[in-house]
Image (cartoon, rainbow, N blue to C red):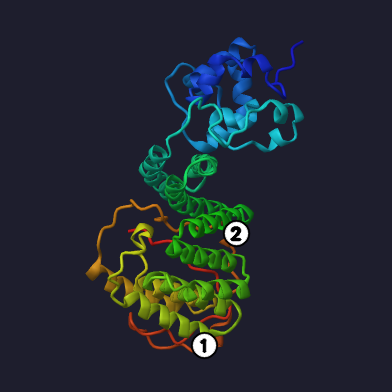
């Protein structure tokens, strides 16, 4: 009697079959399911292995439905034991436990099957053109939807920059620093702080090699934000101060770093220092800035409203939501009168989504712990700041 389950490893001949490779590359699951059926893995087994209904498997196999969601693609890869690289995914956990797969699987990172050299200028232009789609995917669908593609782009860029001349390499490093910073943010948003730190460090390295000091200062701010998200207050403050010391830091980068330092002081229980830095950040964000040095970063979201939202969040976290609501309402009234529409077109425009690591809130403090002030105006500092706070978001603009 046949064991009615998908085998732990698909036949090597099936995985290496040109039609299977082509179908996986195109994510043509009608073709994949057809080839699996020829190998004796029928729709009922596919449905059971991938936690799908048999009717849905039948509709996909007949071409009536398509599978495009990344979480479903990952479920199929894991359920059917299709190596991640064949479907454009990172290596799956179960692959790491299989010596045979590690030995025979092609490396996924460097465009290993391209067959001809890639022109660096073409790749830089291509990356600039496709990245807005990744930002939009992360913004609307979540960071995981952009993670695999951005990872492959950065890995390929890393390979290219090691084998080109100086001028072409500088262009690769400039776009690479911004792309690696985005990849660091994607990993942070997914709660993988190890990878977030790794790619932020690469972004810093490439920015410094390319002489992009503004980007280097911005990455220091982002690393401070990562430290705040992990509740490492001392590191958050020192990194934010380093960003502010940079002679290349623009007013907006300094404003972002100042409000990040404020959050670090709040974590350390220094509300007075926190308020002072929030006030400084507010002034910097409000000051006219004729410089275009940070235009590539698109920091237009760094406004007095942004700073005050960070300040107000402190009150929510520590038990004074009434004052925070008053601040939010005041800022919203001010915002409505000056609202503008902004397109998502920059390499460093990412919408704020909560990292799984940041979802927990500290226990609210008793209301009497804080004096209840009168409603602050949009341009006056809030007289209260909590002693413990999670960042309102991860240093990204509010959705418009």
Which one is earlier in the sequence, the residue at label 1 or at label 2?
A: 1
**What kind of element bears circle 2?**
helix
Judge whether residue 147 can be spotted in this image.
yes
Location of mark 1 (residue): 272
Q: Residues within 10 Å of mark 1 (few under 14, many from 20)?
A: some
For residue 375, above or below residue 213: below
- Residue 2: give x, y in percent of width and height: 74, 12
For residue 247, above or below residue 38: below
For residue 198, above or below residue 326: above
- Residue 324: give x, y in percent of width and height: 43, 76
- On the picture, is 25 further left or further right than 298? right
Q: Quadrant of the C terminus?
A: bottom left
Q: Residues within 10 Å of mark 2 (few under 14, many from 20)?
A: some
Q: Residue at x 44, y 18 (%)?
A: 63
**What kind of element bears circle 1?**
helix
- Residue 141: give x, y in percent of width and height: 44, 45
Q: Quadrant of the N terminus?
A: top right
Q: Residue at x 59, y 14 (%)?
A: 17
Camera-side residue: 360 or 165? 165
Camera-side residue: 37 or 88? 88
For residue 24, above or below residue 248: above
- On the picture, is 101 further left or further right than 54? right
Q: Quarter-wise, where is residue 270 in the image?
A: bottom right
Q: What distance separates the C-alpha of mark 1 from that of mark 2? A: 27 Å
Location of mark 2 (residue): 357
Q: Quarter-wise, where is residue 308 in the image?
A: bottom left
- Which of the numbered marks, if any, corresponds to residue 350? none
Judge whether residue 51 can be spotted in this image.
no
- Residue 24: give x, y in percent of width and height: 53, 24
**In the image, farthest residue toward the left:** 337
């Amino acid at each position: 009697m046949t064991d009615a389950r998908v085998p732990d490893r698909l036949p090597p001949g099936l995985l290496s079959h040109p039609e299977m490779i082509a179908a996986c590359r195109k994510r043509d699951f009608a073709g994949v399911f057809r080839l699996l059926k020829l190998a004796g893995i029928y729709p009922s087994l596919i449905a059971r292995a991938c936690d799908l209904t048999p009717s849905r498997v039948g509709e996909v196999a007949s071409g009536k439905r398509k599978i495009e969601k990344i979480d479903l693609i990952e479920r199929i890869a894991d359920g059917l034991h299709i190596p991640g690289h064949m479907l454009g995914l990172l290596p799956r956990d179960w692959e790491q436990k299989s010596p045979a797969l590690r030995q025979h699987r092609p490396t996924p990172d460097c465009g290993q099957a391209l067959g001809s050299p890639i022109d660096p200028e073409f790749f830089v232009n291509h990356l600039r053109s496709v990245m807005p789609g990744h930002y939009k995917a992360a913004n609307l669908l979540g960071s995981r939807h952009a993670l695999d593609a951005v990872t492959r782009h950065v890995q390929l860029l890393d390979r290219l920059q090691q084998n080109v001349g100086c001028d072409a390499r500088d262009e690769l490093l400039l776009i690479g620093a911004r792309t690696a910073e985005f990849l660091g943010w994607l990993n942070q948003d997914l709660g993988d702080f190890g990878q977030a730190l790794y790619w932020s460090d690469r972004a810093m390295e490439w920015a410094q090699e390319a002489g992009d000091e503004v980007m280097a200062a911005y990455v220091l701010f982002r690393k401070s934000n990562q430290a705040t998200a992990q509740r490492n207050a001392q590191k958050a403050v020192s990194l934010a101060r380093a960003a502010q010391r940079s002679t290349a830091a623009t007013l907006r980068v300094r404003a972002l770093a100042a409000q990040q330092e404020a959050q670090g002081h709040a974590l350390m229980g220094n509300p007075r220092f926190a308020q002072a830095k929030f006030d400084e950040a507010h002034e910097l964000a409000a000051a006219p800035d004729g410089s275009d040095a940070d235009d590539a970063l698109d920091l237009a979201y760094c406004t007095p409203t942004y700073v005050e939202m960070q300040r107000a969040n402190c009150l929510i976290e520590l038990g004074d939501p009434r004052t925070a609501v008053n601040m939010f309402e005041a800022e919203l009234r001010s915002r409505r009168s000056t609202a503008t529409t902004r397109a998502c077109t920059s390499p460093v425009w990412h919408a704020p989504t909560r990292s799984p690591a940041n979802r927990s809130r500290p226990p609210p403090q008793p209301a009497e712990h804080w004096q209840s002030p009168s409603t602050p105006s949009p341009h006056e500092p809030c007289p209260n700041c909590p002693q413990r706070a999670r960042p309102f978001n991860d240093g990204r603009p509010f959705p418009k």
